[in-house]
Amino acid sequence: MTELEIPEEYLAGYAQILAEVAATGRRLSREELTSRRALGNRRLTPATDCAPWSAPI
């Protein structure tokens, strides 16, 4: 099995968010969720990459 490589730009700030959430028990803020979704959406656009599950058989 091959290991999925995640570019550093998609993880930037994520460790800090998780540390704060874990320390306080709070949920992610709307801003934090929106920023993470935006990065994920950029990653899955056809112009930048083709997700393996959408590849033709």
Image (cartoon, rainbow, N blue to C red):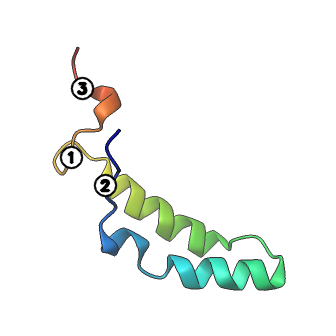
Q: Earlier in the sequence, mark 2 or mark 1?
A: 2
C-alpha separation, residue under disc 1 versus residue under disc 3: 11 Å
Q: First in sequence, mark 1 or 3: give its number.
A: 1
Position of residue 37 relative to residue 49, above or below, is: below
Q: Residue at x 27, y 47 (%)?
A: 45
The residue carrying mark 2 is: 43
Q: Is residue 12 above or below residue 49?
A: below
**Element type at marker 2?**
helix
Q: CA distance from mark 2 to mark 1?
A: 7 Å
Percent across and percent down for residue 33 are: 58, 66
Pair 3/2: label in front: 3
Which residue is situated farthest in the top direction here? 57
> Is label 1 in a helix, a strand or a loop?
loop
Distance, label 3 to label 2, CA atoms, is 15 Å
Dot 3: within a 10 Å radius of its alpha carbon, few (fewer than 14), some, or many (20 or more) residues? few
Q: Which amino acid lies under the numbered mark 1 shown in the image of this protein?
A: Asp
Q: Residue furthest front?
A: 1
Q: Which amino acid type is marked by label 2?
A: Arg
Label 2–label 1 contact, CB within 8 A: yes
* Quadrant of the rendered image containing residue 23: bottom right
Assess whether mark 2 and mark 3 are in contact (beta carbons under 8 angstroms): no
**Residue closest to the eye, 41 or 11:** 11
Label 3 belongs to which residue? 55
